[in-house]
Image (spheres, rainbow, N blue to C red):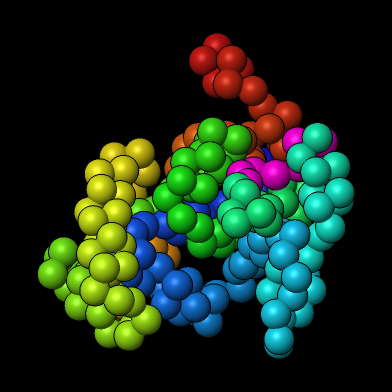
Amino acid sequence: MRFSSEKNKGLLIVISGPSGAGKGTICKELLKNRDYWLSVSATTRSPRKGEIDEKSYYFLTKEEFETKLSENDFLEYAEVYGNYYGTPKSKVIEKLETGKDVILEIDIQGALKVKENYPEGIFIFILPPSMEELKNRIIKRGSETSESLMTRFKSAYKEINYVSKYNYAVVNDEVELAVTKIESIIITEKCSVERFEQNILSKEGLIHEQLND
């Protein structure tokens, strides 16, 4: 009997963390290094200049979105300022079933909803080197007033407490090092016995009970 790692089910890798932790930068670097598929969100808001349907977002009407909601076709969703945003379940599952690893960059509340609906995903929490550094990164964006800066910083401080809900935590002090750690996590997960049983033993017609005979 020959065991092969080819065409196994892909991994859903959820990258999350507080604003300013650098999860967006990390995801861009991950996509440069390997052939991941970046999950695209759906929204009912109108496209902005330069945005492309099915690349920037899946642009849906409110009726289309609500139909998909009734069909349970979102891993998570939220309504923000009168518009819906969500992660299409069917698109993600389709890619996973072909063996493609899927990267999902999302906020903490969305990540926890995804975990409820797809607990076999890999949930990675991105942490800043320190709260002072997090504050500096938010300031450098230059898009915050003093009041909104403090609101965002206080929110980030609370969000860090959610790290215990995740499978892994990665400190983003150096982007390249953080990316290397995440890639190591992915390799480790692909070699776990649980996933081996799911992807290989089931294909070979072997069941767990037989191994115990």
What segment carries the magenta color?
71-77
- The percent coordinates of residue 193 (x first, y second) are 47, 37
Is residue 5 at all visible to an observer of this figure? no
- To which quarter of the image does residue 204 belong? top right
Is 77 placed above or below 147 here? Answer: above
Left or right: 59, with 19 as reference point:
right
The verdict on residue 74 being magenta is: yes
In the rendered image, the quadrant that contains the N terminus is top right
State the residue at coordinates (70%, 44%): 74
- The percent coordinates of residue 114 (x first, y second) are 55, 42
- The percent coordinates of residue 127 (x first, y second) are 27, 61
State the residue at coordinates (75%, 59%): 44
- The percent coordinates of residue 32 (x first, y second) are 53, 82
State the residue at coordinates (82%, 36%): 71
The verdict on residue 75 being magenta is: yes
Q: Nearer the viewer, residue 89 or 46?
A: 46
Is residue 73 at all visible to an observer of this figure? yes
State the residue at coordinates (81%, 60%): 60
- To which quarter of the image does residue 36 belong? bottom right
Left or right: 91, with 78 as reference point:
right
Is 18 placed above or below 194 here? Answer: below
Left or right: 73, with 132 as reference point:
right
Left or right: 15, with 116 as reference point:
left
